[in-house]
Structure formats: C-alpha cells, structure tokens
Image (spheres, helix red, strand yellow):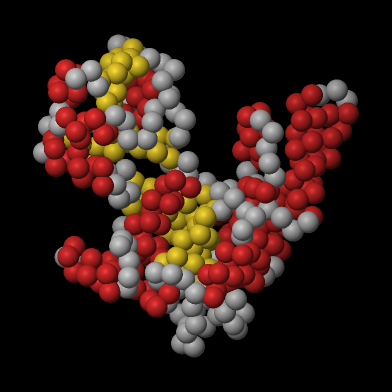
Amino acid sequence: MSLKCGIVGLPNVGKSTLFNCISSAKAQSANFPFCTIEPNLGSTNVPDRRLDVLSEICKPQRTIPATVDIVDIAGLVRGASRGEGLGNQFLANIRECDAILHVLRCFDDGNVVHVDGSVDPVRDKEVVDLELQIKDLETVEARFAKAEKAGKAGDKDAKRLADLLARYREALTQGKSCRSVALLNDEEAALAHDLFLLTNKPVMYVCNVDDASAANGNKYVEAVREAVKDENAEILIIAAKTESEIAEIEEFEDRQMFLQEMGLEESGVVRLIQGAYKLLGLQTFFTAGADECRAWTIHRGDKAPKAAGVIHSDFEKGFIRAEVIKYEDFVSLKSESACRSAGKLATEGKEYVVQDGDIMHFLFNV
C-alpha cells in the first residue's frame, strides 16, 4: 500500500536524525543547513504487540509485520514558494506524500545552529505553514476562475468545485491551512482529494526536545500546543538524538533500562511510527496460522473484498465470503477451531467493514 509520510521542517531541526531512528535506511545527519538535498525514502516495521501475541500462540514458521514508508525531505526556508533554497523541490516532494510529520526544534543547544539564529518552534511552524499556504493559494486561484465560469454556465459539478475553492481561498487569505475548512459531504471530500493541496494533508507536529523534556515536554512544547489548539492535528514529543542512541542498543532489556531512566514506558520512535500509520488512515487485520502470522495493511473503512485483495488480487475478484475472528476471542480461546466451536467465528459477506485487529480467512473462487 504505497502511502508515504513526509518528514518536513526547517533545516537543522532534527529531521534526518529522526529519520535514521525510524527507518531501515540511513540518511546523512550533520550540523549544517541543507544536509539533506535528495529525499530519503525508508520503510519501517509498525510495532504491534498483538502480532507478537498471535505468534506466541501459533508458533508460526515466520512472522511478518505491517510496514510504513517514511520520506526525509530537504529543509525549507523563507521564500520556498518563490524557489528560495531548495523550495521548489521541497514543495514537489511534499505533494507526493500522503501525510506530514512536521518536526519542530524544541531544545536549546548552542552547538547546533538554527537557520534563523534562535529557538522559536511556533515561528518555525508559521514559516513552513506560510510557504505551503502561498503555494496552495496559487493552485486555488488558478482553478477557481475556470470552475466559477463553468459553474455559471450551468455545470453543476464545476459549481460545487467553485464553492469549495472559494472556501479554501478565504481560509488561505486569512493565514489558515486548507485542513481547517470543514467538508460538507463525501462528494466534497473527493473533490478536495483531487486538488492535492499541500495544507490539506493530515499533519502531526513532532516536538524534538532534550533528554530532560522527553517525558513531560517544556516551555517550547507548551507554546506549540497553544499554537495548534484549533487545528485538527496531533503533537508528539521525542528526543531524537537520544532515540538515535537507543536505536543502536542491541539488547531489548538495555533499551528498556535506558528508557526508564528517561521516565518513559516506551520509545518515542514506537509512538511516532504508530502515529504515522494512524495519520495515513491505515489499520491492520491479521492472518494467523502455523505457517505464518502476518499483519496486513488496509484503509480504515475498507470492506472485506478490498482487504482480500491486499493479499492477492484474485481473492478480491473471486471473493465469496470472509471468516472473521475478533482478536480478543482468538487470544482467549487460543485457536481457530476453538473459536469455531464456541461460536466466535463469524461469516461475513461483501459489505462487511473490516475492523482493526480482525483475524481473517477468505474464501474465493476464480
């Protein structure tokens, strides 16, 4: 499922360090602006304790987790919408991503230069937002005149598009992102998707802090919380430099001891990967047996035939029905046969909406 989260932010805020923590690929990380020029693409496993539990029960020959793609994009500076710095490339790379992880520097360190000379995550956020909003306004203005003209001539689809574009234009001219505009129905949601607006992409603000602030944040994090309180966005706190050191520790027990010393129950990287998966609108269903336990990725709201097609296109084409066991029932009863005997195996048809954590077996005919 080729959906990608893009890591964005100003130069030198910790994007590449964070990318190195979460990705199987390794990006260059250094103390100077534009260290990243070409976008780095990496794929990482999505941590899921449920898959571990299923493997403990089934003892399969192999266990395969879900994955998510992360892109480390070149840093942005003021004037990117006019081509300053690596602006045009930066904006094009964001357009190719499905969601945004916006990294904000929330730590003081005189040894790490800041492109604007001082630490102010809210200002940094506004710099990135403004450049994306300017580019979106260009897109909206270019589409609006044509849609409005066609709408006045009687084209109902064009009229609906023009109405939506007008609301986007109003928001953008007020310094708001397109994601702040409420969509009225599924039809508008489809129109919005086809516009590929940069500020309409779902976003998570990643506050990169020092060790002392990893558990509870700091004054910079609180300033970010206040700045984004009216946005439909999540905030995640992470100490990227320390997380990169933890990632190098091989023994699980040693990693956990390191985290406990920081006052954390789990790695910030785990929370970030899971957050990116959720941000992309993804969820997981499982197949479980002696040969393989596997986590499969689908969109939230997908129906059973679509889920079957993730395994193989023939499964979707020839879909007959799905046998579904709830994760909690499988863990309680320990096997498919026990679930069947206890009446905990349901037979579902083409209209069944797959739920996160379902354990599924598909019957098909081609």
Give the residue drawn at x 62%, y 79%. 116
60 sits to left or right of 169 = left
- In the rendered image of this protein, does residue 169 appear above or below residue 194? below
Q: Nearer the viewer, residue 337 or 201?
A: 337
246 sits to left or right of 356 = left
Tally the numbered discs.
Answer: 0
Give the residue drawn at x 15%, y 32%. 334
Give the residue drawn at x 67%, y 49%. 180
- The C terminus is located in which quarter? top left
What percent of the width, then of the height, locates residue 93?
55, 54
Report if residue 272 is visible in the image.
yes
Q: Nearer the viewer, residue 223 or 33?
A: 223
- The N terminus is located in which quarter? top left
What percent of the width, then of the height, locates residue 219?
54, 75
10 sits to left or right of 273 = right
Q: Quadrant of residue 194?
A: top right
Give the residue drawn at x 32%, y 26%. 312
What percent of the width, then of the height, locates residue 256?
23, 66
- In the rendered image of this protein, does residue 66 appear above or below residue 325? below
- In the rendered image of this protein, does residue 229 appear above or below residue 336? below
What percent of the width, then of the height, locates residue 18?
41, 65
Q: Nearer the viewer, residue 124 or 359?
A: 359
